[in-house]
Amino acid sequence: MCFSLVMLFLCLSQTELVRVWAQQQTDNWYSVISQQHEESTGGDSHPHQAQRSSSGHARINRAVLGGGLTIDTLPDNMTHVVEDSGKYYTWRSFGPEDQRTQELWVDMSDVRHGQVRVHGILSNSYKQAVRVALSFDFPFYGHYLRQITIATGGFIFTGDITHRMLTTTQYIAPLMANFDPSYSKDSTVQYLDNGEVFVVQWERVRIPRRESEGAFTFQAALYKTGAITFCYQDIPLSLDVMSSAEHPVKVGLSDAFMVSTPSPQSPGQQSISPQTKRQTIYEYHRVEIDTKKITSFSAVEFTPLPTCLQHDSCDLCLSSNQTSGCSWCNVLQRCSDGMDRHRQEWLDYACSDESKDLTCEDYSRTDTSTDSSITPEIEYVTLSTPLRKGCESDDETKRHIFNTGNDVKTDSSTKTDRLANTGVIAGIAAALVLLLALILLALYINYHTTAPSPLYLIQRRKSCWPSWKFQKQQPGYTEVEGGHEKDSIVEAGPC
């Protein structure tokens, strides 16, 4: 009896632990909605008219799930996450006494910076994120972004595929924490975009169950040049005492790439259904800022460094002093170190193996010989942008290239085809002219039967000419040689 009670107690304890762990994982999930949905609801007409539930949270729960999407760390045989390496960004932090802190702060009330938009949904929601389009191309880790996702938790998600675990990677986080803008009418999430800079400001947002300790006001600015700034006006709590049990607490940058891998299947499933692919996100770089430096009236400024992706030729890729570790993939016409958002294509086209044995001179000789003997007919082939929506588009591009590559023709065969085409056209034209001449001749003979030329042809014929012809209907009779007319049809006698 006692043993049974002990086992029951252990089972209940384990079940409770699993429930708590699942609850913590669920608490980190974000609901993502599109900007069009927010505009259709008129969320910005009045920032505080969203209907709230009894718990104080807005009744908005539209999530975009990434089916078959997992987030993992890099395996042992790949480069691990590089933290604070200074490879992609350099940064400096400024305190309250620095003049640069005031210069970096963007006053949202100043109309000279542009029109400020208070986002109605984000200002009245908890753990909500909304996609927003940028008016300019923003370079992030060498990739150009035109859309970002603003989250209520004090960060910006930069990934192409939205999922619920936005806090894991691919973020710009001035202060990622468990903020709840729906708690107070004074809490807002606002942004502006003037074509040169995109600024998001979390104003007077509070942490659940610690609302009385003060409100946070801070902002993140994304510049067209690729520079990023974090500015802090009110930080009532030290970040060291902020709990990360319900929500991660981070300050910094992160990026990742997505790779498609075959999903594990049992032998029975492999025979029944085809092998499916699982998309896995791997974080390849992270910048973490010391949270002790985040205080009221402080700032952090990030300056982007040159990346391999900016080189558009083999010579620049391999000889530039601004970058290191770059390799040129001639198939993709891309410079990379293999660790960026185009990782899937880099693997699909075996660019690492290609770059080991060949040099730029080899590529130029190959291209020269190819140009002199082969005329490529590949048109409208797009080799993809970052992280497109899935890896199937890359495969489609590859098939397109291979299929069109089979249709190339040499110069000699092209010339022969041109001569053959010219002969065919000339023959067709001559046949049409001859046919037209015969038609005109027949019409002339038909309408001018008594003229000298038709009579001459009839008298000099060596064989039986066709004996049927049509004439105009006239009131009277017309004498025709060798027969009698009836109903405008003349039948000639036997030869």
Image (cartoon, grey):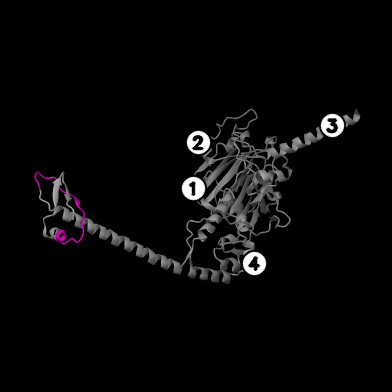
Disc 3 is placed on an element classified as helix
How many labels, in total? 4
Asked whether 334 falls inside the magenta stretch, the response is no
Q: CA distance from mark 2 to mark 4?
A: 53 Å
Point out residue 304 in the picture as x, y percentages from the top left corner. 60, 57
Disc 1 is placed on an element classified as helix
Q: Nearer the viewer, residue 99 or 307?
A: 307
Q: CA distance from mark 3 to mark 2?
A: 52 Å
Q: Nearer the viewer, mark 2 or mark 1?
A: 2
Residue under label 2, please give it: 40
Rendered position, 313 above or below 446: below
Residue under label 4, please give it: 356
Q: Nearer the viewer, residue 82 or 124?
A: 82
Where does the magenta region start and end? 456-477
Q: Nearer the viewer, mark 3 or mark 1?
A: 3
Point out residue 117 in the picture as x, y percentages from the top left corner. 52, 41
Q: Decide: marks 2, 4 in contact (CB < 8 A)? A: no
Q: Residue at x 78, y 34 (%)?
A: 16
Asked whether 476 falls inside the magenta stretch, the response is yes
Disc 2 is placed on an element classified as helix
Q: Nearer the viewer, mark 3 or mark 4?
A: 4
**For the stretch drawn in magenta, what is the main secondary structure?**
loop
Q: Amino acid at mark 2?
A: Ser
Residue under label 3, please give it: 9
Q: CA distance from mark 2 to mark 1?
A: 28 Å
3 or 2: tag closer to the N-terminus: 3
Q: Amino acid at mark 4?
A: Lys
3 or 1: tag closer to the N-terminus: 3
